[in-house]
Image: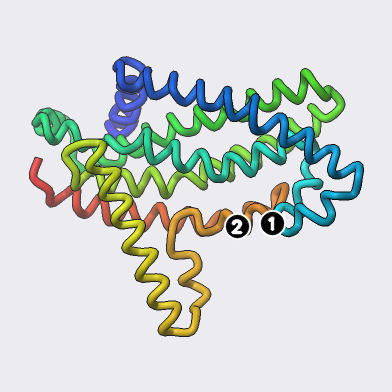
Amino acid sequence: MRVLLVARDEVLRLLSTRRGLLALLGFLLIWAAVLNYGILPAARFFTGASESGLSELVLPRLGLSEWQHWPAPALAVYWVVSLYLLPLMALITSADQTASERSRGTLRFLVLRCSRLEIFIGRFAGQCVIMGLVILATLASVLIVILAQSPVQFAASLAHSPVILINLVLLVLPYIALMAWVSVMARSARQATLYAVIIWLGVSLLVGFLQSRLGGLTILDWALPGSQVSQLLRLSGWQTLTLAPIPVIHTVVLLLIGGFLMGRRDL
């Protein structure tokens, strides 16, 4: 119950602070530009390429051979854009889960009412709710555009929405968990982001070294969060959930590390 209260406070903190509102406003403006100048023109291009037969030559080379199996071109483009844009959004919005409060000393007062682990999990859960709402809002905007431009494709697009929503939520979970971990070690959101970049680069270099030494172990290909994105681009519909265990495992491992450090860090 206290975890839910901490999660609720995390959501309200975003909506009640100037920094949180500015972050939401900034994302809305960026998303409006992406939708208007990126997704919609690309959808029109893919539609024209499909009619001319160009898509059969070009899109497979880009790893987008499955896009024609989506019910609407705009939904297919949204799928591709979201796989890369939403993790970046998750890193930015979830960077300050506990860092600034530790720096101000206010985290010590919160510990008087709930445990460190409850705070850690609650903040993580709150950020998951925030990103879930962001994903839902972006998906709804694309569905509204499809309804306005191609009503015939709307019903099928709506039927595909649950699998898109589930996949995108699973995709961002490891990134939120990573920021939960580094936020435990940092004193500010900027420092947490820097730690995340250092960890990411360090693991990337280590994976590259091990692959060169050990002859390319398959399991190393899945070491980093988001490593399944290239495979998701080649899938569509419910078959995309065959890769669901990858982000779940990443999330659990990162939360275990972060929770362990949370219990031992000075507040």
- Asked which secondary structure carries label 2, the reply is helix
Q: Is residue 8 depicted above or below 223 in this figure?
A: above
Whether label 2 touches label 1, CB < 8 Å: yes
Label located before the other in sequence (2 or 1): 1
Q: Position of residue 202 (x, y in %)?
A: 32, 63
Q: Amino acid at mark 1?
A: Gly
Image quarter of the N terminus: top left
Structural crowding at the residue carrying mark 1, measured as other residues with C-alpha within 10 Å and reported as few (<14), some (14–19) or many (≥20): some
* Residue occupying image coordinates x 80% and y 47%: 69
- Taking the image as drawn, is residue 137 in sight? no
- Circle 2 residues within 10 Å: few <14, some 14–19, many ≥20: few
Q: Residue furthest bottom?
A: 214
Residue in the foreground of this view, choosing between 51 and 175:
51
Quadrant of the rendered image containing residue 26: top left
Figure quadrant of residue 267: top left
Q: Amino acid at mark 2?
A: Ser
- Residue 54: x and y, percent? 85, 49
Q: Which mark is residue 208?
A: none
> Marks 2/1: CA distance?
8 Å
Q: Residue at x 50, y 39 (%)?
A: 86
**Relative side of 3 to 66, left or right:** left
Q: Name the residue at 51% across, 26% down.
A: 30
Residue hosting label 2: 230
Q: Which mark is residue 63?
A: 1
Q: Callout 1: helix, strand or loop?
A: loop
235 left or right, relative to 251: right
**In the displayed structure image, the side of residue 211 where residue 104 appears, left or right:** left
